Amino acid sequence: MVLNTTFCTMTPEYIQTYHERPLQYKVLCVMGFIFGGFTLIYSLFFLILGGIQNDLLEFVRPGIMPLSWYPVSGMVYSIVAFVLSVSAFIGLIQIWNRVRTGYWIFSVSMLLFLLLPFIFFEVPFLWLFKTLSPYIVITGLFIMLFHYNMKFME
């Protein structure tokens, strides 16, 4: 059995079309992976320890889900947050591979992740905004910096 290894060779055409990632793009992607990883671990932590979410049951916005789901609304919130953080991390992987679609996946997922508590819970807006403000600032910076570096994406 002979293996075809032509896909591994670096032809002159490939070398001419390949562009190294600039240093600031690499650093931004690594910082994005750290941020996305912490977000993923945070949401996984709350998904596994769904009992902690029972404290939030009194703040669930009425009419946001069927009445039969209210006892498990903390788990529903955790599942949605986990799915959004996984999709944001997938977007970061695509950004590292210089795919423009990854920027949009990351941006939309993170914005929905930030809007989720405002939609899902009925707590004072200023309290929730103060609690999430560092996360809002960091997410906004990453979205702006990745947008600025879209010229390095294909």
Image: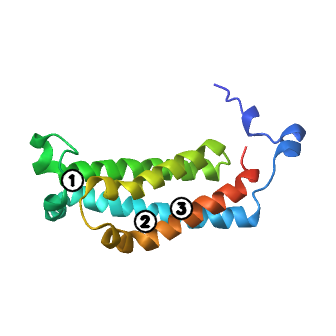
Disc 2 residue type (three-letter): Phe
Query: Is label 2 in contact with label 3 (beta carbons under 8 Å)?
Result: no
- Mark 1 or 3: in front is 1
Query: Is disc 3 placed on a helix, strand or loop?
Result: helix
> What residue appears at the point 23 percent right and 57 percent down from the top-left corner?
48
Q: Spatial distance from mark 2 to mark 1, Cα to Cα? A: 27 Å
Query: Is label 1 in contact with label 3 (beta carbons under 8 Å)?
Result: no
> What residue appears at the point 19 percent right and 44 percent down from the top-left corner?
63
Disc 1 residue type (three-letter): Arg
x and y percentages locating residue 1 in the rendered image: 63, 25
**Disc 1 marks which residue?**
61
> What residue appears at the point 14 percent right and 49 percent down from the top-left corner?
72
**Disc 2 marks which residue?**
38
Query: Is label 2 in contact with label 1 (beta carbons under 8 Å)?
Result: no
x and y percentages locating residue 118 in the rendered image: 33, 58
Q: From this view, report whether residue 47 is shown above or below residue 11.
A: below
From the viewer's perspective, tell me whether residue 93 is left or right of residue 59: right
Q: From this view, report whether residue 50 is shown above or below residue 4.
A: below
Q: Spatial distance from mark 1 to mark 3, Cα to Cα? A: 33 Å
Disc 3 residue type (three-letter): Phe
From the viewer's perspective, tell me whether residue 27 is left or right of residue 130: right
From the viewer's perspective, tell me whether residue 70 is left or right of residue 102: left
x and y percentages locating residue 120 in the rendered image: 27, 53
Mark 2 / mark 3, whichever is N-terminal: 3
Q: Which mark is residue 33?
A: 3
